[in-house]
Amino acid sequence: MAELSDKDTIIRIRNGEINNYSYIVRKYTTSIYRFIERKLFKKEDVDDLVQNVFISFYKAIEKFDEKKPIKPYLFQIVQNELKMYFRSYKKDQPLDERIISEVKQEDFKIEDFKSLNNLEREVFKHISEGYSYEEIGKLFKKPLNTIKSIVRRGRLKLKKIYEKT
Amino acid sequence: MKKLEERIIKKIYKIETEKTIGQIISETVLIILITLSSMFIFSVIIEILNEQTSFDLFDFLRDDFETIRDNFFNNSLLFIRELPLPLIYILIGLLLLLIWLLFILAKNSSKIKNKLVSLYKFWLK
């Protein structure tokens, strides 16, 4: 069977010939797998992420403009999946655990974080839960730059404590 | 990599099987329900018209052409006035919905057929 173009494959899939989706999977799995593999800490999550990318693309295939190339669209999905993955990965790691791991790694003491004021501690807590600066800004009803300043000040305080010890 | 590809394809087929079966079942159930409801409402309308003896208004149709010509317009108007309008509107709405559903089904029939062929080939061959 002659190899179909991506455009024809998409048209056929939309027409219900879902067996054609295997061409897309076979064509792009390797490149996507390698890309994701380079970005992840846990190699066992790579398979799941690659699978999610192809499932997301399949679900979006009705809306996809077949005149456009598939690869950039797939990599856009990869970026979104990676973003969600890192967000959930951060969420899995509570603040206390992060503090403890930092203490072990950099000789910080839990008391060091007590030198931060309430707002700084809250902001760091939200960052560790995977919130973006914008989301934290909305949550605390403060402009983005203020949040950035709070983070910078907090980091400087911690750095000073670290340098002293 | 081959195993991963197979896993992805199997997952896609699983999703599509659930989606297609769900779609076929929901559309069939909807069409049957609308048809049954339309038949029920139609029978109620006929019953009401029978009770009102509204069909007697068309007895003149058995007479000669002259009488039919003279009475057709007036009697038809009277008959329309006696119709249970809320039920008629519901019936028209249901019939339009049914036509729309059948149109969608006819439009997607080749797509559904291709999907079923693909699913059959994947799962049963």
Image (cartoon, coloured by chain):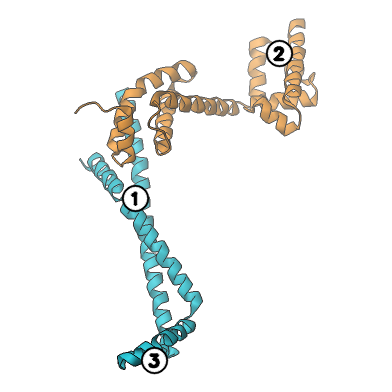
Chain colours: A orange, B cyan
Kindly identify which numbered label has been placed on residue B21.
Answer: 1
Q: Nearer the viewer, mark 3 or mark 1?
A: 3
Are tags 3 and 2 found on a single chain? no
Viewer-side residue, B74 vs A93: B74
User: Residue B56's mark?
Assistant: 3
Whole-number angstrom distance, CA of label 3 to CA of label 2: 98 Å
Image x and y of residue B68, in percent: 35, 89
Quarter-of-image position of residue A130 = top right
Q: Secondary structure at mark 2?
A: loop
Residue at image coords 75%, 32%: A140
Chain of the residue that carries numbered disc 3 in the rendered image: B
Q: Vertically, is B79 above or below B18? A: below
Residue at 38 percent across and 32 percent down: it is A66
Cα separation, mark 3 vs mark 1, equals: 49 Å
Which of marks 1 and 3 precedes in the sequence? 1
The reply, left or right, for residue B13 in relation to residue A132 is: left
Residue B85 location (% of width, % of height): 49, 77
